[in-house]
Image (cartoon, grey):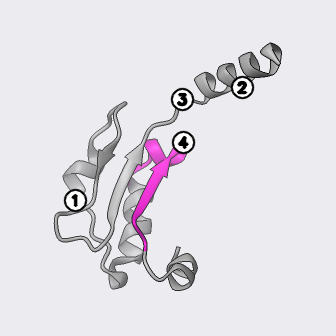
Amino acid sequence: IGAYLAVLGRLDALTFTAGVGENNPALRKAIVDRLSGLGFTLDDEANAVRSKEPRIISAPGSVVTVLVVPTNEELAMARETKAAIAG
């Protein structure tokens, strides 16, 4: 993440998704805590919430917005399969 930030010059958001990113608040906290020197701040209460909806888990003063965005891999695969069959 730090390497991308150095190359890009700025970061619009840090997004956690898929199985581990969605369901492991301890891992998200560990990652964001290691980025605290760059201005990333986590809202511990928001991070602990389990939800099927996209949500912001960064603290109000965080330099970068940190999000959790649930995925639906099954739906994505079904859409791709339908498109492939339809030609």
Q: Quadrant of residue 10?
A: bottom left
Q: Amino acid at mark 4?
A: Ala
Q: Amino acid at mark 1?
A: Asp
Q: Amino acid at mark 3?
A: Asn
Q: Residue at x 36, y 72 (%)?
A: 33
- Distance between mark 3 and mark 1 Cα atoms: 25 Å
Residue to which mark 1 is pinned: 43
Residue to which mark 2 is pinned: 80
Q: Quadrant of residue 28?
A: bottom left
Residue to which mark 4 is pinned: 18
Q: Amino acid at mark 2?
A: Glu
Q: Which numbered disc, 4 or 1, marks the residue that appears first in the sequence?
A: 4
Q: Secondary structure beneath disc 4? A: helix
Q: Which numbered disc, 3 or 1, marks the residue that appears first in the sequence?
A: 1
In the rendered view, tell whether residue 15 sits above or below residue 51. below
- Distance between mark 2 and mark 4 Cα atoms: 18 Å
Is the C-beta separation of discs 3 and 1 under 8 Å?
no
Residue to which mark 3 is pinned: 72
- Distance between mark 3 and mark 4 Cα atoms: 8 Å
Magenta segment: does it hold 18?
Answer: yes
Q: Callout 3: few (<14), some (14-19), or many (20+) C-alpha neighbours within 10 Å? A: few
Is the C-beta separation of discs 4 and 1 under 8 Å?
no
Q: Picture coordinates of residue 72 (x, y %)? A: 54, 29
Q: Picture coordinates of residue 7 (x, y %)? A: 57, 83
Q: Which numbered disc, 2 or 1, marks the residue closer to the eye? A: 2
In the rendered view, tell whether residue 69 sits above or below residue 72. below
Q: Which residues are magenta?
A: 11-25
Q: Secondary structure beneath disc 1? A: loop
Q: Which numbered disc, 3 or 1, marks the residue closer to the eye? A: 3
Q: Residue at x 28, y 47 (%)?
A: 48
Q: Residue at x 35, y 59 (%)?
A: 66
